[in-house]
Amino acid sequence: MVSPFRRKGKDSTSKTSEDLDLDEAVNESEVIALGDGEPSPAELPESVEVEPEEANVDMDELMEKSAITVIDTCMDLRRGENILIVCDPTTTDIGQALHNAASKRSDRVLLVVMPKGRHHGEEPPAPVVNLMRQQQVVIAPTRYSLTHTRAVRQAIKDGARVATMPGMTNEMFTSGGMSADFASIKKNMGEMAPVLRRKRIVNVKSEAGTNVTFEVNWREWKLDDNGICNRPRMLTNLPAGKIFTLPREGTMNGTIVIDGSWDSALVDEPIVLQIEDGLVVDVKGGTAAAQIRQAFGEAAKRLRSKEQENVWTVAEFGFGMNPQARLMGSVLEDEKRMGTAYFSIGDNTTLGGASAVGIHVSGVMNSPSIWLDETELVKDGQFIIK
């Protein structure tokens, strides 16, 4: 296992890359139900009206509605287009709903159930890779993310537009971030472009202890993860709503404290990452720290010795822009929540970096403060520039 504490020699060269990442989310609808301790409708005062129960809405109808949104609004599937839906045994209901919705617009729809992967960024099986290269539209609701894989990069290069949904569940598919107005999110994210322009230094702080600084290429901020994926060679996550970038390799130094979620699980104890020259050199945080060391150590063993240290690259930074997304222990939705920020460790090649390590894991921070040069963009989780 490669230790995160080992540092590169001072005479080793560090490659500089471009950037990518995003931001925003949180606005949840409230559901009021009568529990065992509540009065029955007959016991309620006459002035209290009992709303019809919506909890009995058929889940199939909700799945169908969300699937139609994905196919018609997000992907804008055209009649006759080739579309591949890739799911695994944990997401077959979602895959079937998407297949049904897509079949109403095209007679060239394939649904493939592949084995569940072992971690984010793992390549899909070769037959799936080959199918992805032959499609105009690819949608991948899977337990582990395919976003940062060679398979997705190649499909996009060949002209496909791709939506990935790592960690998607039936509940997430029918509520929360997926219920957002993606056209409005696209508009709001587009208005961030002037704010990001010509800003080179990013500083992120939090009351939990985060204080980290790094450089970015302001031209490489990604503003298109807005849920609208309607042109060739586009890539988005669903639910969408984040602004993100690639930290310049070798420029990040400081401390990151993950106090929201890590790898699709809410954290019981904050995870502290010490960063030097763009690499994680120390990990603290109880049992989670040991699990992180094991996962990244196993990924390192699959690489050549001179590349093993690259698994600890801080690969991505972003902030959420989806007002309906929730912090719920799913990286897919957590990093879109307005008022949060996230850092990813591992593979950064999808964003233009040089760390091709086959693992990519994100940690989400609660209530960060974010500076772009001398301009404060977010203060304790609240946008102060709009």
Image (cartoon, rainbow, N blue to C red):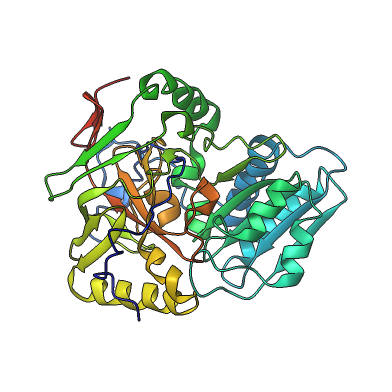
- Work out whether residue 32 or residue 206 is closer to the camera in this orientation and state it: 206
Taking the spot 39% from the left edge, 35% from the top edge, the residue there is 323
Q: Position of residue 250 (x, y in %)?
A: 33, 50
Looking at the rendered image, the quarter that the C terminus falls into is top left
Instruction: Give whichever of 265, 15 is nearer the camera.
Output: 15
- In the image: residue 137, left or right of residue 73: right
In this orientation, does residue 383 appear?
yes
**Quarter of the image where the N terminus is located:** bottom left
In the picture provided, is 99 more to the left or to the right than 201? right
Q: Position of residue 44 (x, y in %)?
A: 26, 44
Q: Is residue 5 above or below residue 10?
A: below
Q: Foreground: 304 or 100?
A: 304
In the figure, 319 relative to 5: above or below? above
The answer to whether residue 56 of the structure is visible from this angle is no
Judge by depth and name the residue closer to the eye, 348 or 307: 307
* Residue 364 spot, x, y in % from top left: 31, 52
Q: How many marks?
A: 0
Kindly identify the residue that appears in the image at 43 percent across and 40 percent down: 245
**Quarter of the view holding residue 126:** bottom right
Identify the residue at horizontal 24%, vertical 70% (top origin): 5
Query: Residue at coordinates 37% horizontally, 44% vertically from top-left?
Result: 247
User: Which residue, as the protein is rendered here, is positioned at the far front?
Assistant: 11
Q: Quadrant of residue 2?
A: bottom left
Please state the horizontal and vertical placement of residue 139, each as a whole percent of the image. 66, 52
